[in-house]
Image: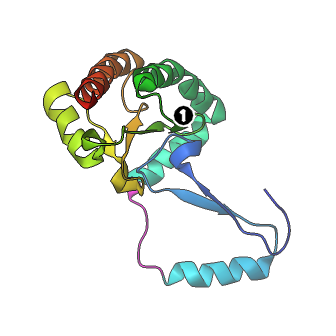
Amino acid sequence: CFQDAHVINIFSFSKGFAMAGFRVGYLAINNNKDVYRQMIKVQDTIPICTSRLSQIAAQGALSAGRNWVLHKVRTLESSRQAILDALRPLETKTIGGSGAMYVMAKLPQGKNGDDMVVGELFVEKFGIAIIPGSFCGFPGWIRVCYSNLPPRDCIIAAGRLEKGIKSLLSCEE
């Protein structure tokens, strides 16, 4: 953390503690009592807070510590690699996969480049759910999460993804 008097450090449990969706975060400031008093004024007027369950989960994450998180992150490697391998037939640029829990890949140009249509097709024909890139500001791309399944199941899903991609590519020819 930066200790400068004018810096407020803002953190989220989403990536740092693998708690995406829990909507828990925290602030760290130096010992400046005036900054603290001003922050309390603002916090006191905000009528929302994270759920009690999320607060308990965050407390558990802090108690377990970073080593637990790092161990879990290491278990993602085989899933990440399986998804990257499944996307390889696209022969296009990918985004993510190094610090994120997902990878994005550009779809081929042409009739099969509509990410919304591809999303529906992959669910209906291949039993694989992807996020259309349009939902993330990247039309013509797909977003594939690899952290929400156990590695063995993710490898199976990656096989389905690869079949879907190969089917898309064969229709382009």
The quarter in which the N terminus is drawn is bottom right
Task: Classify residue 110 as left or right of residue 22.
Answer: left
List the single residue furthest toward the right: 4
List the single residue furthest toward the left: 124
- For the residue carrying disc 1, how many other residues have a C-alpha within 10 Å: few (<14), some (14-19), or many (20+)? some
- Specify the quadrant of the image occupied by residue 146: top left
Task: Assess whether residue 48 is covered by the magenta stretch.
Answer: yes
Q: Secondary structure at mark 1?
A: loop
User: Residue 69 placed where, x, y %?
Assistant: 58, 32
Task: Assess whether residue 74 is covered by the magenta stretch.
Answer: no
List the single residue furthest toward the front: 173
**How is the protein colored in the picture?**
rainbow
Which residue is label 1 attached to?
Answer: 97
User: Residue 125 placed where, x, y %?
Assistant: 15, 28
Magenta: main secondary structure equals loop
Which residue is at the front of the view, 127 or 65?
127
Q: Is residue 145 above or below residue 55?
A: above
Task: Classify residue 30 as left or right of residue 116.
Answer: right
The quarter in which the C terminus is drawn is top left
Number of marks in the image? Answer: 1
Q: Is residue 70 above or below residue 55?
A: above
Q: Residue at x 51, y 48 (%)?
A: 14
Which residue is at the front of the view, 91 or 117?
91
Q: Could you tell me the amino acid type at mark 1? A: Gly
Which residue is at the front of the view, 149 or 84?
84
Q: Residue at x 21, y 44 (%)?
A: 117
- Specify the quadrant of the image occupied by residue 123: top left
Q: Residue at x 63, y 36 (%)?
A: 65
Residue range of the region highlighted in magenta in the rendering:
46-52
User: Residue 88 placed where, x, y %?
Assistant: 45, 23
